[in-house]
Image (spheres, rainbow, N blue to C red):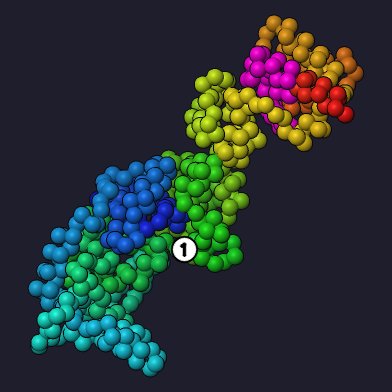
């Protein structure tokens, strides 16, 4: 079998965590089986679908590097094909026009509910209407089988059996002729030769209806795999308050796509106790049979831990390119300054996100005019004047601007002035970084360069002098 999977989001909002995991599982299964991954945009909801949402989906898929082999296909460009199938189903006796008014359908529904019956269409027009009202544009309903059952051998849920008597005659086309979701999905999956439909289990109730439509079309049935939902830590359905934001929001917050993919991979799937997976390992090891049938719980702290792991272990050159993107968001030109890969190596142990790394690295590339108030108040007292002056002198004369000689200079000044190393290094750190946190001071100075280092020490000395004069 030629495996073909698809991801088919509706562009009525952003690409969220649940959708991204479904896309990942579909992509992985196709790649593992040497098949194709199709991207389809289900944009028939004209009132809610927007170009901005389409772009948000494409941006999210691009950032996660879940490249499609075919598509994106847009359902709004396939209306002629849907009409062709609907007309054929009517001609073959598998569908029929329904002229029931909204008022009649509401009355039927109220009566059924008062009798504690399942609300459903009562089949009023199923056998045909002798005298169709000329002023009514009918909907087209599917003539669902009334006997037998639909068997779904779900690759995650196991066998699911639904009696046909539980299903009513669903609408295939609205009164204005536009097709409905269950019809368009079936036609698309058939035309695009989708072999495996991998989607959220909120679609499980649609599957028996879609199988019956496929059978009426004489089409082969795909394999189905319904992925359980994701819950928040409170056990409720994932929402914005749990972190169910746009995938691109994680980019904005400084997460790496590798970390998010790794986290989504483990959200309902496992391979022993292994936590960290490269993309190659994901593709090699993933199997639908290993997807947990129960709902998964979203844990933001676990995602943050994974992100920190990838920051610590990823190639510095790659992360340097990522860091450049986040520095650009701070309007920082990093062309004049240390190599980005070296900054990554200096900062990676202290950063949980790339936003944090960019914020902490800004001082390497952009000069500042003010020191962090709390750090300056603590470290720029009168006692800091002598060590900073001495450091200014010895660093000016230092023949080799490297971390080790710089380290020896700082040590020598502390020893000469009979001070603890912190009493020398910390005022120096605030002087050059503008705040009390930076990589090791010798590495910080090497990356910053002699000229910027000496200029900032001078600025710190002037700051201390002003404070002493106004004290």
**Looking at the image, can residue 143 be seen?**
yes
Residue 402 location (% of width, % of height): 67, 14
**Looking at the image, can residue 277 be seen?**
no
User: Where, by quadrant of the figure, is residue 143 drawn?
Assistant: bottom left
Is residue 361 highlighted in magenta? no
Residue depicted at 28% across the width and 44% down the height: 69
Per the image, the residue denoted by label 1 is: 229
Question: Which range of residues does the magenta coloring cover?
Answer: 431-459
Residue depicted at 15% across the width and 68% down the height: 86
Residue 168 location (% of width, % of height): 27, 80
Work out which quarter of the rendered image holds the C terminus and state it. Answer: top right
Is residue 451 highlighted in magenta? yes
The outermost residue toward the front is 470
| Nearer to the camera, 118 or 129 | 129
The outermost residue toward the bottom is 115
In terms of secondary structure, what is the magenta stretch mainly?
Answer: helix
Vertical position of residue 224 compared to residue 422: above or below: below
Vertical position of residue 159 compared to residue 278: above or below: below
* Horizontal side, residue 344 vs residue 280: left or right: right
């Amino acid at each position: 079998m030629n495996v073909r999977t698809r991801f088919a989001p509706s562009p009525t909002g952003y690409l969220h965590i649940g959708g991204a995991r479904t896309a990942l599982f579909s992509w992985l299964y196709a790649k593992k089986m040497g098949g194709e991954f199709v991207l389809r945009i289900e944009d028939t909801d004209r009132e809610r679908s927007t170009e901005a949402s389409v772009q948000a989906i494409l941006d999210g898929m691009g950032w996660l590097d879940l490249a499609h082999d075919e598509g994106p296909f847009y359902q709004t460009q396939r209306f002629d094909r849907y009409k062709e199938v609907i007309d054929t189903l009517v001609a073959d006796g598998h569908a029929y026009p329904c002229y029931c008014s909204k008022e009649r359908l509401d009355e039927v529904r109220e009566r059924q509910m008062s009798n504690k019956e399942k609300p459903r269409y009562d089949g009023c027009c199923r056998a045909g209407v002798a005298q169709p009202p000329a002023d009514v544009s009918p909907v087209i309903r599917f003539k669902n089988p009334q006997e037998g059952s639909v068997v779904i051998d779900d690759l995650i849920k196991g066998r699911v059996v639904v009696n046909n008597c539980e299903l009513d005659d669903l609408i295939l086309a609205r009164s204005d002729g536009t097709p409905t979701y269950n019809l368009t999905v079936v036609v698309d999956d058939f035309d695009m030769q989708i072999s495996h439909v991998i989607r959220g289990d909120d679609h499980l109730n649609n599957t028996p209806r879609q199988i019956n439509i496929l059978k009426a079309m004489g089409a082969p049935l795909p394999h189905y795999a319904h992925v359980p939902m994701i819950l928040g830590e409170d056990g409720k359905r994932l929402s914005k308050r749990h972190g169910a934001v746009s995938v691109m929001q994680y980019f904005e917050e400084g997460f790496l796509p590798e970390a998010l993919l790794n986290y989504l991979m483990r959200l309902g799937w496992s391979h022993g106790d292994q936590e960290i997976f490269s993309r190659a390992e994901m593709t090699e090891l993933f199997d639908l049979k290993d997807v947990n049938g129960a709902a998964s719980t979203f844990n933001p702290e676990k995602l943050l831990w994974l992100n920190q792991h990838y920051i610590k272990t990823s190639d510095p050159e790659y992360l340097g390119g990522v860091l450049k993107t986040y520095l650009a968001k701070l309007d920082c030109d990093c062309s004049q300054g240390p190599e980005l890969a070296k900054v990554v190596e200096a900062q990676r142990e202290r950063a949980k996100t790339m936003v944090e790394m960019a914020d902490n690295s800004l001082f390497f590339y952009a000069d500042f005019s003010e020191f962090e108030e709390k750090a300056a108040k603590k470290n720029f007292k009168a006692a800091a004047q002598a060590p900073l002056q001495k450091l200014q002198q010895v660093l000016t004369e230092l023949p080799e601007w490297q971390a080790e000689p710089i380290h020896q200079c700082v040590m020598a000044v502390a020893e000469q002035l009979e001070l603890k190393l912190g009493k020398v290094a910390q005022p120096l750190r605030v002087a050059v970084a503008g705040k009390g946190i930076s990589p090791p001071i010798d590495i910080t100075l090497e990356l910053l360069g002699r000229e910027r280092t000496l200029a900032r020490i001078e600025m710190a000395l002037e700051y201390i002098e002003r404070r002493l004069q106004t004290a």
